[in-house]
Image (spheres, rainbow, N blue to C red):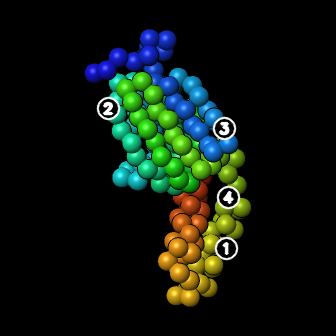
C-alpha cells in the first residue's frame, strides 16, 4: 500500500476541475466517482487509475457521511495513491438541482430526439441521446440525495 501525503494522514486530496477553474480542492476521507464502468470509491493508497465519467453524482465523504454531492455530466478521473483529480465539463451541487427544471430538460431532449428520427447524422443523434441521459441522471441524483 502506498504512502499518503504526510500533511493529510488518512486522507486523499480530491480536486474537481472545470475548463475554467478549480471548483474544489480538499483533503477527504473518501470520494465516490460515477465511472463509465460503474461507481468506484477512492481512499488513501488507491491504485493508479484513469477512468471516463458517466453522468452522475460525485459523493465526498467524511466517515460514513456524505458531505458534498456534485452532479457531473461527463469527464475523466485520474487517481493516484495520494490524489483523485476529476476533470469535468461542468459541475453542479445536487442540492441546487430543481426537479421541475430538470423534468422540462428531459421532456425537451426526448422530444428533440423523437423529432429528429433518422434525419440526423450520427454525431447529432449521439448529442441528442446524451442530453436525454444527462437529464435522466439529474433526476436520479435528485431522487437519491
Could you say which is closer to the camera, residue 91 or residue 18? Answer: 18
Q: Quadrant of residue 103?
A: bottom right
Q: Residues within 10 Å of mark 2 (few under 14, many from 20)?
A: few
Mark 2 or mark 3, whichever is nearer to me = 3
Q: Is residue 41 left or right of residue 112?
A: left
Alpha-carbon distance for marks 2 and 1? 41 Å
The percent position of residue 130, horizontal first and vertical second, equals 54, 66
> Considering depth in this image, is 112 or 107 the residue closer to the camera?
112
Residues 68 and 22: in front is 22
| C-alpha distance separating marks 4 and 1 | 14 Å
Of the numbered discs 1 and 3, the one sitting upstream in the chain is 3
Q: Secondary structure at mark 4?
A: helix
Residue 132 in view here:
no
- In front: label 4 or label 1: 1
Disc ID at residue 21: 3
CA gap between label 2 and label 4 equals 37 Å
> Viewer-nearest of labels 1 and 3?
3
> As drawn, which residue projects farthest toward the left?
1
**Residue beneath label 1, please?**
108
Disc 2 to disc 1: CB gap under 8 Å: no
Would you say residue 123 is visible in this rendering?
yes
Instruction: Decide which of tag 4 and tag 1 comes sooner along the chain.
Output: 4
User: Circle 3 sits in a helix, a strand or a loop, which is it?
Assistant: loop
Mark number displayed over residue 99 = 4
Residue occupying image coordinates x 46% and y 42%: 77
For the C terminus, the image quarter is top right
Q: What percent of the width, then of the height, locates residue 137?
A: 54, 58
Up the image or down, 105 lies above or below 33; here it is below
Of the image marks 3 and 4, the number of the one nearer the N terminus: 3
Quadrant showing the N terminus: top left
Measure the alpha-carbon separation of dots 3 and 4: 27 Å
Amino acid at each position: 500500500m502506498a504512502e499518503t501525503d504526510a500533511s493529510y494522514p488518512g486522507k486523499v486530496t480530491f480536486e474537481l476541475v472545470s475548463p475554467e477553474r478549480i471548483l474544489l480542492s480538499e483533503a477527504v476521507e473518501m470520494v465516490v466517482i460515477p465511472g463509465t464502468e460503474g461507481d468506484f470509491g477512492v481512499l488513501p493508497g488507491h491504485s493508479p487509475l484513469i477512468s471516463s465519467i458517466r453522468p452522475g453524482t460525485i459523493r465526498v465523504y467524511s466517515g460514513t457521511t456524505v458531505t458534498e454531492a456534485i452532479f457531473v455530466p461527463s469527464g475523466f478521473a485520474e487517481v493516484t495513491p495520494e490524489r483523485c483529480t476529476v476533470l469535468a465539463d461542468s459541475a453542479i451541487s445536487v442540492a441546487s438541482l430543481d426537479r421541475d427544471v430538470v423534468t422540462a430538460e428531459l421532456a425537451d431532449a426526448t422530444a428533440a430526439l423523437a423529432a429528429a428520427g433518422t434525419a440526423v447524422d450520427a454525431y447529432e443523434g449521439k448529442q441528442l441521446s446524451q442530453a436525454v441521459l444527462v437529464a435522466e441522471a439529474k433526476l436520479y441524483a435528485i431522487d437519491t440525495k
